[in-house]
Image (cartoon, rainbow, N blue to C red):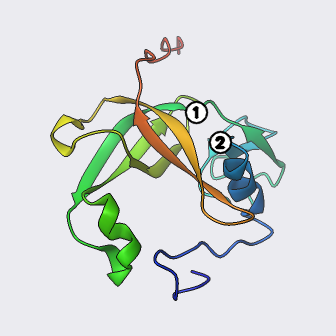
Amino acid sequence: MADTSLAKPLPAITDLTRPFWAGAKNGKLMLQKCQRCANFDFHPKPWCIECGSRELAWTEAKPFGTVYSYTVSRSVAMNFSGWQAELPVLMCLIDLDDGARMYGQVTHCKPEELQIGMRVEAHFEAISEEAGIPKFRPSQQAAPEARPA
C-alpha cells in the first residue's frame, strides 16, 4: 500500500504489476499469458505457474467470468474510511473465461442476489493518475461452451 493517509489504500505499483494497473486505467483487463503453454494467470509473476516458462506476454483477457466463491464484508476494511460508502462489499473469486482465477469486487448487485455460478463482467474504476482497478457486475452473457477434452 502506497499511501495510508488516503481514504482507501493504493497498490504499490512495480515494474512487474504496472501493465495490469495501467490496462485497468485504460478499460482493459490485462493478464500475463504464457507464450509456451498459453496459460493465463493472475496475479503477475515472473514465470508461468503451469510450465515454469518466463516467456510471458501481457495480453488483453476477455472481461467475462463466473463467480467461483464469495464473501460479504459488512464492516470497514483495515480502518480505511473510504470503504464505508461501499458497504456491504462483495468480494469474489472469479473464474475468468480465459482460464485465470482472480479476486475482485462485485458491484451493482445486492448481497442476497450474489451466488456461486453467477456470470459477471468487468468494468473499470480509475484509482490514481496511473492506475485503475477492475471490478465486476452481473452479466447477461452466457458462459462459453466447454471445449472437448
- Going by the numbered disc 2, the residue's amino acid type is Leu
Question: In the picture, which quadrant includes the N terminus?
Answer: bottom right
Q: Is residue 60 above or below residue 41?
A: above
Q: Nearer the viewer, residue 37 or 107?
A: 107
Q: Is residue 51 above or below residue 132?
A: above
**Residue under pointer 1:** 63
Write the residue at 70% across / 45% down: 30
Q: Is residue 149 visible?
A: yes
Mark 2, Cα crowd under 10 Å, few <14 / some 14-19 / many 20+, is: many
Residue 11 screen position, x and y as percent: 60, 72
> Residue lying furthest bottom in this view?
5
- Going by the numbered disc 1, the residue's amino acid type is Pro
Q: Which mark is residue 29?
A: 2
Marks 1/2: CA–CA distance = 6 Å
| Earlier residue among tags 1 and 2 | 2
> Residue lying furthest left in this view?
112
Helix, strand or loop at label 1? It is loop
Helix, strand or loop at label 2? It is loop
Q: Are marks 1 and 2 in contact (CB under 8 Å)?
A: yes
Write the residue at 81% across / 55% down: 54
Q: Nearer the viewer, residue 121 or 145?
A: 121
Write the residue at 20% across / 45% down: 111
Residue 32 screen position, x and y as percent: 72, 47
Q: Which mark is residue 80?
A: none
Write the residue at 44% across / 18% down: 143
